[in-house]
Image (cartoon, coloured by chain):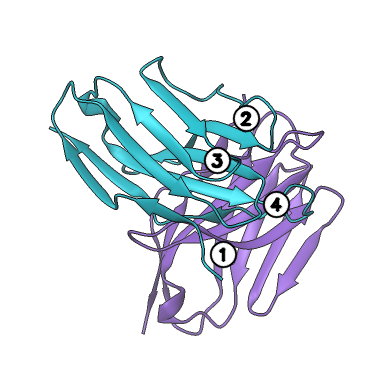
Amino acid sequence: SQKIEQNSEALNIQEGKTATLTCNYTNYSPAYLQWYRQDPGRGPVFLLLIRENEKEKRKERLKVTFDTTLKQSLFHITASQPADSATYLCALHRGGGSYIPTFGRGTSLIVHP
Amino acid sequence: GAGVSQSPSNKVTEKGKDVELRCDPISGHTALYWYRQSLGQGLEFLIYFQGNSAPDKSGLPSDRFSAERTGGSVSTLTIQRTQQEDSAVYLCASNQEGVSSYEQYFGPGTRLTVT
């Protein structure tokens, strides 16, 4: 089965810096990889999707990269703000008609003013 | 428009009791998912409904867990003879088949505490 590794330790950064979160996976290469944001006491909220044939995807201050050789996705938040503090989850889709994603445990990001 | 709603938001029950958790997906969404999230753990897939197809129950941890989806809309997750290890947040999500983003819309979850 697919295993996903996200750093269990919280990432603490200073406001204005770029936050970089890592999602590593084993086994099969996913057809799609998503990133979600989760605030305490709330459900995850979709942020970005990147496909296996894409190297990079951007949305406003967010950037996701996908390296199928390294089996890794990086999630970047530029010019970070305290409001970006949350837990960020990656989710992998096998594709091929499978619609059930596998989620990582998430990494907590804390942006200090 | 209205998002995914879940009820109750919190449920405290005694070990051995049955509980029912409800999910109202976004109107028109054909796919519905149930997940379980324990403290410090990722989202654990439980069950998936898609249209009129037979549900994918491969994630249900035991036969004490079951779920229904009536009329292609509201879903109920039932846990019989609850155990303390069932304590977790139960999340429901829905999406529309065929949307290339595979984006899932999550509800706020039901926090279940078994005492």
- Chain identifier of the residue bearing label 1 in the image: A
Residue sitting at x 82%, y 33% = A96
Query: What residue is shown with label 2?
Result: A2
Q: What colour is chain B?
A: cyan
- Chain identifier of the residue bearing label 3 in the image: B
Q: Please report contact status of discs 3 and 2: CB closer than 8 Å, yes or no.
A: no
Q: Please report contact status of discs 1 and 4: CB closer than 8 Å, yes or no.
A: no
Q: Nearer the viewer, mark 3 or mark 2?
A: 3
Query: What residue is shown with label 3?
Result: B33
Residue sitting at x 26%, y 35% = B87
Residue sitting at x 29%, y 53% = B9
Q: CA distance from mark 4 to mark 3?
A: 12 Å
Do discs 3 and 2 belong to a common subunit?
no
Crowdedness of circle 3 by 10 Å Cα count: few (<14), some, many (20+)? many
Query: What residue is shown with label 1?
Result: A20
Q: State which tag comes first along the sequence, 1 or 2.
A: 2
